């Protein structure tokens, strides 16, 4: 039997404000804290359906900026003219596909696998998606650019955070207040790209 989650205060507030999902408050909180989305920015948003991050980032970058959203499913909301949707699998993306639009100021990834309830398997599936998002970000961000990527905590996440720490001036894991306490999700933040290989300096 599948149990339906009760709508919480974030869900109700998101609906009241016209946002497609409660996850908008996670991005808003991390943006307020780390100063990620700025007017005129070029943003790539991986795992963008139903579209609340596209709405938030589109509103903040304004018409001098641009946002590209990628997901297996299209957004459920109307997009601003400077926000574009690409229907694709994040695991099949290559940097060459973004040659016309990169380099980006910010790569966001809220991509998440369909969960099975088996924590270990869900964490591995999430890690695979988030590693693909980090690889793409390191290949398409401007020097000084930023990354924010969700992952379900599990084996391999600490190594991924270490890689992000080496690649950016600031690298860390963060659990936003708007994230459900029971969820194993955390967000990996990289701010100020300095070493796109993410490798140790010899
Ligand atoms: C938590 S939702 C994203 C919510 C979004 N940030 C928002 O605020 O509206 C995660 C998304 O990841 C997408 N996803 C999962 N696997 C994917 C894949 N391999 N490629 C592209 N998108 C994928 C799902 O379709 C889902 O829409």
Image: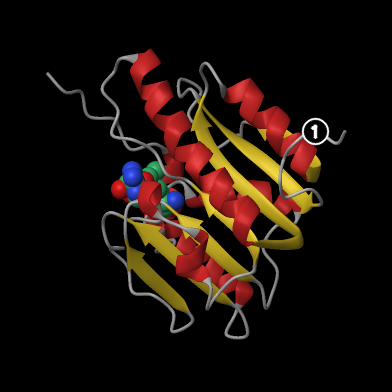
**Quarter of the image where one finds residue 70:** bottom left
Percent x, y of residue 80: 44, 79
Q: Residue furthest front?
A: 202
Residue at point 48%, 22% (across, down): 184
Q: Quadrant of the C terminus?
A: top right
Residue 5 shown left or right of residue 177 in the figure: left
Q: Nearer the viewer, residue 126 or 167?
A: 167
Q: Nearer the viewer, residue 94 or 18?
A: 94
Residue at point 44%, 33% (across, down): 128
Compared with 101, 26 (above or below) is above
Percent x, y of residue 134: 58, 44
**Quarter of the image where one finds residue 2:** top left
Q: Residue furthest right?
A: 202
**Quarter of the image where one finds residue 165:** top right
Compared with 81, 185 (above or below) is above
Name the residue that disc number 1 marks: 200
Percent x, y of residue 47: 40, 51
Residue at point 75%, 56% (across, down): 35
Percent x, y of residue 129: 43, 39
């Amino acid at each position: 039997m599948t149990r339906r989650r009760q709508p919480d205060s974030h869900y109700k507030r998101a609906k009241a404000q016209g946002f497609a999902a409660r996850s908008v408050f996670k991005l808003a909180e991390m943006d307020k804290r780390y100063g990620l989305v700025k007017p005129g920015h070029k943003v790539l948003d991986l795992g963008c359906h139903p579209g609340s991050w596209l709405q938030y980032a589109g509103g903040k970058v304004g018409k001098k900026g641009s946002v590209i959203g990628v997901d297996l499913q299209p957004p459920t909301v109307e997009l601003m003219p400077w926000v574009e949707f690409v229907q694709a699998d994040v695991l099949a993306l290559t940097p060459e596909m973004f040659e016309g639009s990169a380099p980006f100021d910010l790569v966001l990834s809220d991509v998440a696998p369909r969960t099975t309830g088996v924590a270990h398997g869900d964490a591995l599936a999430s890690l695979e998606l988030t590693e693909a998002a980090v690889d793409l970000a390191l290949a398409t961000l401007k020097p000084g650019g930023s990354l924010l990527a969700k992952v379900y905590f599990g084996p391999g996440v600490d190594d991924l955070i270490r890689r992000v720490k080496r690649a950016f001036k600031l690298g860390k894991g963060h659990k936003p207040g708007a994230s459900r306490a029971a969820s194993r999700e955390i967000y990996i933040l990289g701010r100020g790209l300095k070493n796109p290989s993410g490798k140790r300096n010899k």
